[in-house]
Image (cartoon, rainbow, N blue to C red):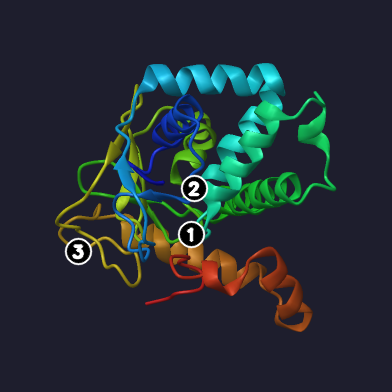
């Protein structure tokens, strides 16, 4: 059986619920918007059902614990092939294994695979908490484009909501074409059909940016140059802390 779902975590948990209910072993679990080549087999699309997803979520926390459930949720946002099948195998073992501590068995390849996948996502979240650069728009909203390896924009929300609680902002994933908008009260998921920013540099277009923005950008670049002691440059260490694939939207690395 090949399952299709809407790509959300709740949609995936709904698939888990239905697979157990029907006692069917998935051959593949595929987001409906995916470009993955579809294998041959019986196909069914499972609509998201939040009540069923909640039941699975509560069962995960009961069989493991809240910390492990959170780890599983983080792993889901990895942009990796076959992640759904890895998570399915993991959950199947969690729900059927007689050992209540199975989920801590790092010698199991599926447990180890899920934990490692979550670590990769968390590492990128941590990096982007320091790499996000905002630019003020003409309407007072602070805008920041990102281009992460994993689908982490939702996982950045709580950090920036707490850090910039008194100002509206948007963090936009240009690779996946959606973002999170915080209006100082609530968080909304947004899609920008006609972007007022340069997709290559991330800079707001002239008509869309605040009139003081270039001044602040140049100040930041001057500050970066002032503290960047040429004689003490360590490119290897710099790339360890700030891999080059993340430089795309950093103003200190992309001067104009």
Of the pair 130 and 101, the residue shown nearer to us: 101
Whole-percent x, y for residue 99 in the image: 82, 27
Of the pair 184 and 111, the residue shown nearer to us: 111
Which label's residue is closer to the chain start, 3 or 2?
2
In the rendered image, the vertical position of residue 226 relative to residue 8, given as above or below: below
**Distance Cα–Cα, label 3 vs label 1:** 25 Å
Q: Which residue is mark 2?
A: 152
Whole-percent x, y for residue 254 in the image: 45, 74
Q: Residues within 10 Å of mark 2 (few under 14, many from 20)?
A: many
Please report contact status of discs 2 and 1: CB closer than 8 Å, yes or no. yes
**Distance Cα–Cα, label 3 vs label 2:** 28 Å
Please report contact status of discs 3 and 2: CB closer than 8 Å, yes or no. no
> For residue 94, which quarter of the picture?
top right
Find numbered disc 3 in the image and state the secondary structure of the residue it sits on: loop
Q: Is residue 142 visible?
A: no
**Distance Cα–Cα, label 2 vs label 1:** 7 Å
Q: Which residue is mark 1?
A: 148
> For residue 215, which quarter of the picture?
bottom left
């Amino acid at each position: 059986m090949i399952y299709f779902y809407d790509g959300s975590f709740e949609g995936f948990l709904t698939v888990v619920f239905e697979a157990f209910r029907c006692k069917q072993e998935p051959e593949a679990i595929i987001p409906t918007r995916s470009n993955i080549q579809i294998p041959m087999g019986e196909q069914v699309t499972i609509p998201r059902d939040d009540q069923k997803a909640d039941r699975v979520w509560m069962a995960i926390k009961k069989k493991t614990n809240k910390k492990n459930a959170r780890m599983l949720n983080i792993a889901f946002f990895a942009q990796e092939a076959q992640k759904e099948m890895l998570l399915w195998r993991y959950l199947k073992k969690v729900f059927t294994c007689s050992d209540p501590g199975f989920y801590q068995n790092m010698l199991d390849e599926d447990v180890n695979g899920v934990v490692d996948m979550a670590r990769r996502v968390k590492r990128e979240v941590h990096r982007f908490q320091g790499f996000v650069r905002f630019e003020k728009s003409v309407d007072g909203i602070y805008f920041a484009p990102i281009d992460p390896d994993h689908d982490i924009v939702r996982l950045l929300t709580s950090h920036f909501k707490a850090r910039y609680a008194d100002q509206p902002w948007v963090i936009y994933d240009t690779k996946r074409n959606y973002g999170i908008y915080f209006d100082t009260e609530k968080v909304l998921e947004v899609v920008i059909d006609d972007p007022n920013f340069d997709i290559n540099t991330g800079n707001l277009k002239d008509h869309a940016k605040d009139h003081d923005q270039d001044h602040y950008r140049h100040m930041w670049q001057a500050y970066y140059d002032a503290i960047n002691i040429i004689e003490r440059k360590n490119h290897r260490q710099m790339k360890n802390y700030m891999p080059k694939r993340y430089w795309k939207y950093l103003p200190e690395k992309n001067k104009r």
